[in-house]
Image: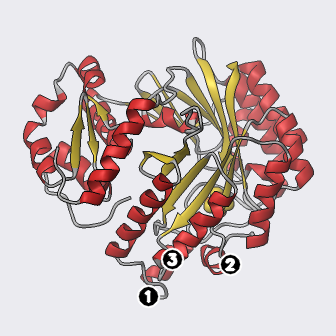
């Protein structure tokens, strides 16, 4: 494949080389997710389900432990546990220990499982972090978001820059070797040097994983209301795209492999990558069970999710009922759409062999014209059995996915 832009060509070749040398840790074992529905304060941009009434914590914890006993998971073997939220670090290490112990008691969770805890700066003390490690947590995901106070204030985060640094340093001192950092970029008026400053500071800590999410203005959030009222102005699409490309260039130059549109894993000396094994399950449609309010589960082509409210959640469980809100069975067509959408999010792309096995359809044959058109426009590349977005294409993920589904033209909107 020939690319017009020499920078892009170098990048695509680099990624191709990396892919050949490294194996992503795919596993058919299931993943277990626990949603802790509490935050100290709601951030201005957040539409995840959480409440700020921390007085509900003890009752919720009891209900969560009971939900583990009620949930049916026969025949499933798990190799990841992800405790997310919300802000799981509002619970101390004794409480997190109770949760981890209960998962081993109630689920077939393998001894070498990846066990992640999300931690927000400003909520976890040094001792707490040490306690989390003793409780069996072997991976931390720290919600730094930015190392610049003006950005933290804009996002409505509770923590300061100093607290962000302290959280990472304390996690290192507590002995965590697998630490991921979350960032948000694309803030109004954010410049390339501004964003690079955050990335450079992040790399000083040598994290194993970086998640870099573009700021989105979700309906119903305070930030969206401010946007609607003209009080904030979103960064122009071209600037957002430039920041996206800057992220990839910078992190690849520093040996971080972009394995998913917003996620980068450090490449170790031995070519070992530190991808989030848990999140990989969502993108590869491996079964997962979700516990806690609003948590989703996916098993045998059935997706179901819990009620998004602590009150009804705890009441259901206290009456020995599952707090499931809704269920859907994915049709073959829905499964195909998800396989395409999730495959395109991954750097490795859609696996045509797996596609054929699953749907009995030759992917390259069925989408011949679309693929050829997108290849000419440098939005898609085909490498052996895989069809993946180029970096240029990744900025148009949603509209390119919809081309496969409806055969529409891609829009010019940036969608990262
Ligand atoms: S801490 Fe996380 S989950 Fe809680 S409000 Fe902020 S972004 Fe949302």
The CA distance from mark 2 to mark 1 is 23 Å
The label number, if any, that marks residue 230 in the structure image: 1
Front-most of 156 and 182?
Answer: 182
In which quarter of the view is residue 312 placed?
A: top right
2 or 1: tag closer to the N-terminus: 2
Q: How far apart are marks 1 and 3 (CA)?
A: 26 Å
The mark lying in front, picked from 1 and 3, is 3
Dot 3: element: helix
Q: How is the image coloured?
A: secondary structure
Crowd tier of the residue under label 2, counting other residues whose Cα lies within 10 Å: few below 14, some 14–19, many 20 or above: some
Within 8 Å: ligand 1 and the Cβ of disc 2? no
Judge from the rendering whether residue 401 lies leftward or rightward of residue 218; answer left or right: left
Q: In the rendered structure, which disc, 2 or 3, sits on the residue that comes first in sequence? A: 2
Are circles 1 and 3 on residues that touch, CB within 8 Å? Answer: no
Q: Name the residue under label 2.
A: 149
Task: Residue 46: tell me if it is visible.
Answer: no
Whether residue 244 is visible here, answered yes or no, is yes
The answer to which of 338 and 313 lies nearer the viewer is 338
């Amino acid at each position: 494949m020939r690319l017009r832009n020499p920078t892009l060509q170098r990048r695509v070749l680099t990624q191709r080389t990396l892919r050949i040398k490294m194996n992503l840790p795919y596993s058919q074992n299931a993943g277990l997710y626990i949603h802790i529905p509490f935050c100290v304060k709601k951030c201005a941009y957040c539409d995840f389900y959480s409440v700020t009434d921390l007085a509900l914590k003890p009752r919720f914890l009891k209900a969560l432990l009971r939900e583990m006993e009620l949930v049916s998971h026969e025949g499933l073997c798990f190799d990841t546990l992800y405790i997310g939220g919300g802000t799981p670090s509002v619970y101390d290490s004794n409480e997190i220990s109770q949760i981890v112990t209960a998962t081993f008691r109630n689920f077939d969770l393998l001894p070498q499982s990846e066990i992640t805890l999300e931690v927000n700066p400003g909520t976890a003390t040094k001792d707490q972090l040490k306690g989390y490690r003793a409780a069996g947590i072997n991976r931390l995901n720290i919600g730094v978001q930015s190392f610049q106070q003006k950005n933290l204030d804009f996002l409505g985060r509770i923590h300061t820059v100093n607290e962000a640094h302290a959280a990472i340093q304390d996690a290192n001192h507590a002995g965590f070797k697998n630490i991921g950092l979350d960032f948000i970029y694309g803030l109004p008026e954010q410049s390339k040097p501004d964003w690079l400053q955050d990335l450079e500071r992040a790399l000083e800590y040598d994290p194993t994983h970086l998640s870099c999410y573009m700021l989105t203005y979700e309906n119903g959030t305070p930030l969206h209301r401010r946007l609607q009222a003209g009080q904030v102005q979103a960064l122009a699409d071209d600037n957002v795209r430039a920041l996206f490309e800057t992220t990839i260039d910078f992190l690849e130059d520093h040996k971080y492999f972009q394995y998913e549109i917003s996620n980068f894993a450090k490449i170790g000396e031995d070519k070992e990558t530190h991808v989030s094994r848990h999140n990989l399950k969502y993108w590869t449609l491996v079964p997962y069970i979700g516990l806690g309010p609003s948590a989703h589960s996916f098993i045998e082509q059935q997706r179901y999710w819990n009620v998004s409210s602590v009150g009804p959640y705890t009441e259901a469980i206290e009456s020995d009922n599952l707090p499931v809100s809704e269920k859907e069975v994915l049709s073959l067509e829905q499964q195909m759409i998800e396989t395409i959408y999730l495959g395109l999010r991954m750097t490795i792309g859609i696996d045509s062999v797996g596609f054929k096995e699953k749907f009995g359809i030759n992917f390259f044959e069925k989408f011949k014209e679309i693929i050829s058109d997108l290849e000419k426009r440098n939005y898609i590349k085909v490498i052996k059995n895989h069809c993946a977005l180029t970096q240029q294409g990744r900025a148009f993920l949603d509209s390119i996915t919809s081309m496969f589904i409806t055969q529409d033209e891609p829009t010019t909107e940036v969608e990262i």
